[in-house]
């Protein structure tokens, strides 16, 4: 409570609303330089009519559900297989360290390679590490799989953190960025809320987590494929908008 109070005071002191633009200034001075892969974007009313907008939301909901749900039960699953508590703690520690590294790495890859490569890297990694988690056992091979899962599951988790503003900016642009990011974040959080209870329900009904994990792999594969459609369609829309601006 004390920490939140201190942070809240600091935010109140240093964060200010964006000042209104001076419309009387010359047009040339009002234009902002284009940074990175940003673009003007489309209005929210236009985005809401696009099929790929809703397809993107479904994919984001699925990733929030699966990554939060599977990550949440990983410790319990490793314990159930008989792995030593000390080794599990080491795996989780490596996971935390790797998460810090991979968050920066994902941003770097996006700057260099673009959205499709970055998104696919995270999606495919998520599928692979979920399969590894399902095959963890109390054996030398199982311990290696657990450690690989612990490290590289951190490369999948940016799908539910730093990839959200990247999706909003890259797919829909700056014009309705704040509103679309708010919706994307809400949908992702809804996935969080559903994920853990759903995975644990599977355990209660079936006696293990593996069925839920393999179903999750299938859903993640579907989300990966759908996201290719989303990115392709959104980038076509972007080119169309940019041509209209130039014309």
Image (spheres, rainbow, N blue to C red):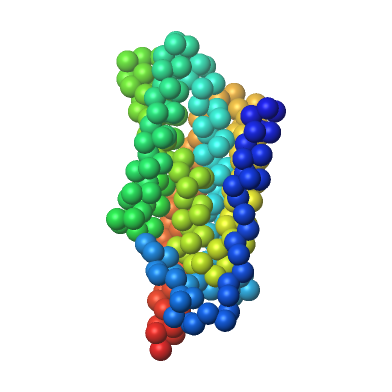
Tell me: residue 50, above or below residue 2.
below
Is 120 placed above or below 104 here?
below
Q: In this view, does 58 lie to the left or right of 35?
A: right
Residue 141 visible in the current orientation? yes
On screen, residue 78 above or below 33: above
Q: Which is more toward the observer, 78 or 190?
A: 190
Q: Is residue 184 above or below residue 244?
A: above
From the viewer's side, name the closer residue of 184 and 19: 19
- Residue 140: quadrant of the picture: top left
Q: Pinpoint residue 43: horizontal percent, then vertical percent.
A: 58, 73
- The residue lying at 61 percent from left, 69 percent from top is 20
Question: Which corner quadrant holds the N terminus?
Answer: top right
Residue 88, image x, y percentages: 45, 17
Camera-side residue: 85 or 100?
100
Q: In which quarter of the image is the C terminus?
A: bottom left
Residue drawn at (49%, 76%) of the image:
30
Residue situated in front as seen by the camera: 216 or 97: 97
Which residue is outermost to the bottom? 247
**Location of residue 181 in the rendering, given as x and y in whole percent from the top left corner:** 57, 57
């Amino acid at each position: 409570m004390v920490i939140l109070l201190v942070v809240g005071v600091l935010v109140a002191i240093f964060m200010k609303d964006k000042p209104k633009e001076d419309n009387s200034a010359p047009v040339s001075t009002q234009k902002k330089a284009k940074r990175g892969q940003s673009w003007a974007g489309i209005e929210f009313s236009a985005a809401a009519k696009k099929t790929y907008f809703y397809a993107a939301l479904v994919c984001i909901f699925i990733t929030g559900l699966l990554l939060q749900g599977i990550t949440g039960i990983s410790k319990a699953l490793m314990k159930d297989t008989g792995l030593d508590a000390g080794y599990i703690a080491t795996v989780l520690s490596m996971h935390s360290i790797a998460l810090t590294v991979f968050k920066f790495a994902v941003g770097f890859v996006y700057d260099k390679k673009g959205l499709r490569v970055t998104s696919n890297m995270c999606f495919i990694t998520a599928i692979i590490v979920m399969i590894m988690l399902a095959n963890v056992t109390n054996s030398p091979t199982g311990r290696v799989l657990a450690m690989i899962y612990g490290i590289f599951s951190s490369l999948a988790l940016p799908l539910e953190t730093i990839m959200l503003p990247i999706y909003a900016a890259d797919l829909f642009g700056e014009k309705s960025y704040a509103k679309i990011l708010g919706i994307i974040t809400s949908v992702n959080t809804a996935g969080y809320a559903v994920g853990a209870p759903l995975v644990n329900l599977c355990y209660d009904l079936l006696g293990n987590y593996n069925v839920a994990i393999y179903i999750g792999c299938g859903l993640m594969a579907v989300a990966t494929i759908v996201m290719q459609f989303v990115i392709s369609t959104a980038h076509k829309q972007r080119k169309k908008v940019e041509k209209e601006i130039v014309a």
